[in-house]
Image (spheres, rainbow, N blue to C red):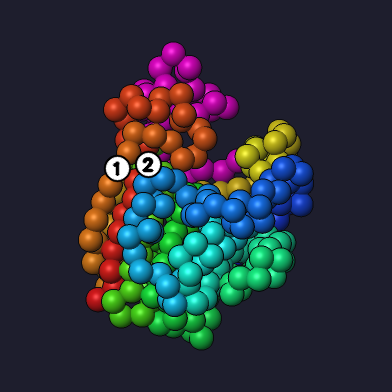
Amino acid sequence: MEEYIEGNKAAWEEAFDNRDSSWGADITERIQKEDYPFFEKEMAEILRGINTEGKTIGQFCCNNGRELLSLVKSGKAAKGIGFDIAENQVAFANGKAKELSLPCTFEAANVYDIDEKFNEQFDIVIITIGALCWFKDLDRFFEVVARCMKPGALILLNEQHPCTNMLAVEGDDEFDPEHRKECHFSYFEHEWTGNGGIYYMTRKSYHSKTFTDYTHSMSEIITGMCNSGIVVTGLQEFDHDLSGGFTAIDNSAFPLSMILQGKKL
């Protein structure tokens, strides 16, 4: 396992161990009572239009499992398998699957190293906000994803828009609250390291173990999919934020999020 991935694993597990008591507390109730909770409305609309009943669904970088659990329950899927590098999050997700009596299993794995026993397992794959940035090589990432998809399988990627990688966020030296849409960083390539922790999970500031993440252009994402035998079938772009870092510029004509759809040949 690459050194940066080992470091990210340790940092994510540290964050989950120090999570706020509210983080994940609503999963059981919302999944029991709502249809497609934890998805953005545009993503939920697309999922409602796909026949997921009786299908096997995979999620890469599944975090605490809430989205996969939501889709399997609401879409009446036969099975869900989620992958995440953080072992404690995977254990939590498996506990939630048991509590909800849903046919989901979660595997602790670096995506690059996913076992060949998962080859051609999935009818549908979902990838959601905050997944791609943890991988330096997207060709390698999508090669594994495609390997796990059946021929004709669908993939839906609901992510932060690559244009946001040019913006500064609060905490960056370049950040100016009066000029939030000013571009400071390269669109094409940037490596970030930091010890600022994961606030949305912990609800506190702390000096964390080191995170390393990477920005990726739209062309890099689409080319990574195409090089792995996935045909792009749709792209929607939105001016509202998924990450929590850019909500102040929602609805101001700057691309903040997207849904990319594809199909394996």
Q: Amino acid at mark 2?
A: Ser
Q: Secondary structure at mark 2?
A: strand
Using the image as rendered, state which of residue 143 and residue 186 is in the foreground.
Answer: 143
Question: Picture coordinates of residue 78 (x, y %)?
Answer: 50, 77
Mark 2 touching mark 1, by CB under 8 A? yes
The magenta-colored residue range is 165-194
The residue tagged 2 is 257
Q: Residue shown at 35%/69% (left/top)?
A: 51
**Magenta region, mostly helix, strand or loop?**
loop
Using the image as rendered, state which of residue 182 and residue 158 is in the foreground.
Answer: 158
Q: Residue shown at 40%/17% (left/top)?
A: 179
Q: Which residue occupies the extreme bottom position in the image?
A: 117
Question: Picture coordinates of residue 253 (x, y %)?
Answer: 29, 27
Distance CA(mark 2)–CA(mark 1): 6 Å
Above or below residue 6? Residue 255 is above
State whether residue 144 appears in this view: no
Above or below residue 49? Residue 101 is below
The residue tagged 1 is 237
